[in-house]
Image: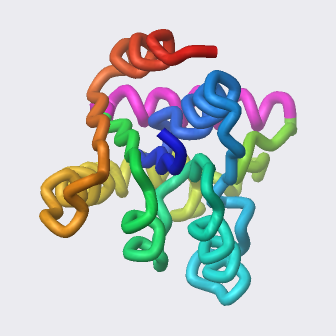
Amino acid sequence: MDRVVVMGCAGSGKSTLARELAARTALPLTERDALGAMGSREYLEALTELAARPRWILDGAPYYADELIYRVADTVVFLDYPKPLVVWRALRRTVRIELTRRPAGAHKPGGSAIWRDPRHPLRWAWTSHQVRRQEGRTLLTRPDLPNLKFLHLTRPAQATRWLHRLHR
């Protein structure tokens, strides 16, 4: 396992799992949200550079560069958790961020405006859950990626067990 993509719906725990995986494997971690605006030249250049490296973890699906990243990745970890769970996690994170006024990744404090923002992670978890689930399941069945190891995790306990089996 040298080139890993961690994907899933907002609130599924991608960043948490990716950080723990990086700690256990010493693979360098790249957060997709830190690469710039999705689809921008800066973003695509960063993903092209990442794809050329021999070892990495990408925290988040590589939108706008799927073919580039999935063709060189050797492992995809798909967090396909139930909608109530991911929405609860996004709500809990939102409350924590709003109370502490400290951001967590792409999730930033926004006051009362967050409840109206269609791109806020809480709303995004609610509205994009089915689309993310379908993306992962489609990726699982792609015949043009026969060497891609695909971990389809449907419960947090599965992720925990998988991580604990990895060597530190």
Give the residue displayed 24% in from the left and 58% down from the top.
139
Which secondary structure type mostly characterizes the magenta part of the structure? helix
Q: Is residue 156 depicted above or below 63 in this figure?
A: above
Residue sitting at x 55%, y 30% = 17
- Of all residues, the one furthest to the bottom in this rendering is 41
Question: Can residue 130 be seen in the rendering of this structure?
Answer: no
Q: Is residue 143 above or below residue 158?
A: below
* Magenta part of the chain: 81-100
Of 103 and 56, which appears nearest the observer? 56
* Residue depicted at x 51% and y 29%: 89
The residue lying toward the viewer, choosing from 53 and 116, is: 53
Position of the C terminus, as image quadrant, is top right
Furthest residue toward right: 101
Left or right, residue 93 beside residue 67: right
Height in image: 77 above or below 167?
below
Residue in the foreground of this view, choosing between 33 and 110? 33
